[in-house]
Amino acid sequence: MNVIWRTLLVMLAARRRLRREGAVAPSSLGRLRLRTLPTDIDVLRHMNNGRYLSLFDLGRWDLLIRAGLVDAMRAQGWYGVVSAETVTFRKSLDLWRRFTLETRFIGHDDRAMYLEHRAVVGGEVYARAIIRTRILRRGGGTVPHDELFAAVGRPEGLPDVPDWVHEWAAASALPSTRRPAPSVWD
């Protein structure tokens, strides 16, 4: 089973839950129960490091759909893109291992929204990722946060984004698409 099929299944399940249970707060903690499948592992028989980020997308889809944000953004002609991400691994997820994918918004700044994902087994964090995402218009340009919050509501109860996340975002940023970014190795 490829990630595209898992994504479609998660999206369908999230829509069903949204209809059945109503919208959740965007600041709520999303949880998905997953299992490491043969298509997720590498030659060392544990989950491939690149697969974590693909599976963490599932958590974003689930939370954004159940919070009603996907429909609100689609109505406005907006979409989200990941502009930076970092992942830290603590323990391996072996083949067939069940784990919970936890997802939540951790805040925003003037240009981006930040989310955290965790792969959790028995209450213990195995891997964590911080995702920086921007909301763009289909016609081009970034959606300012005041416009975004006016359309989808401002999530209540978001904690302050930790200073290290702001430092990471600044340190890992590339020049804008309007500025040159030559590949020069020192």
Image (cartoon, helix red, strand yellow):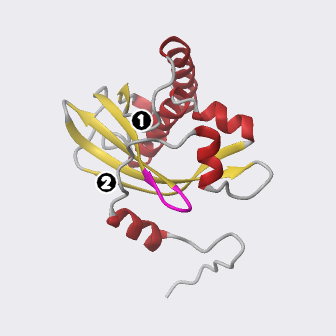
Q: Considering the numbered disc 2 on the image, is that residue within a helix, a strand or a loop?
A: strand
**Above or below, comparing residue 120 to residue 15 in the picture:** below
Quadrant of residue 35 in the image?
top left
Of 181 and 112, the residue lying toward us: 112
Residue 111 disc label: none
- Of mark 1 and mark 2, the one earlier in the sequence is 1
Q: Residue at x 44, y 73 (%)?
A: 171
Q: Amino acid at mark 2?
A: Thr
Q: Considering the numbered disc 1 on the image, is that residue within a helix, a strand or a loop?
A: helix
Query: Quick check: 149 left or right of 74?
Result: left
Q: Residue furthest right?
A: 139
Q: Amino acid at mark 1?
A: Asp
Whole-percent x and y of residue 91?
Answer: 22, 45
Asked whether residue 69 is drawn in magenta, I would say: no
Query: Quick check: 25 left or right of 140?
Result: left
Residue 45 appears anywhere in the view: no
Q: Which residue is mark 2?
A: 88
Mark 1 or mark 2: which is in front?
A: 2
Q: Report the magenta stretch's main SS.
A: loop
Q: Residue at x 31, y 38 (%)?
A: 119
- The residue carrying pointer 1 sits among few (fewer than 14), some (14 to 19) or many (20 or more) residues within 10 Å by Cα, namely many
Whole-percent x and y of residue 4?
Answer: 58, 31
Whole-percent x and y of residue 74?
Answer: 70, 36
Quadrant of residue 48 in the image?
top left
Residue 40 disc label: 1
The magenta segment is 107-112
Q: CA distance from mark 1 to mark 2?
A: 17 Å
**Above or below, comparing residue 182 to residue 166 in the picture:** below
Of 117 and 159, the residue lying toward us: 159
Whole-percent x and y of residue 114?
Answer: 45, 52
Residue 59 appears anywhere in the view: yes
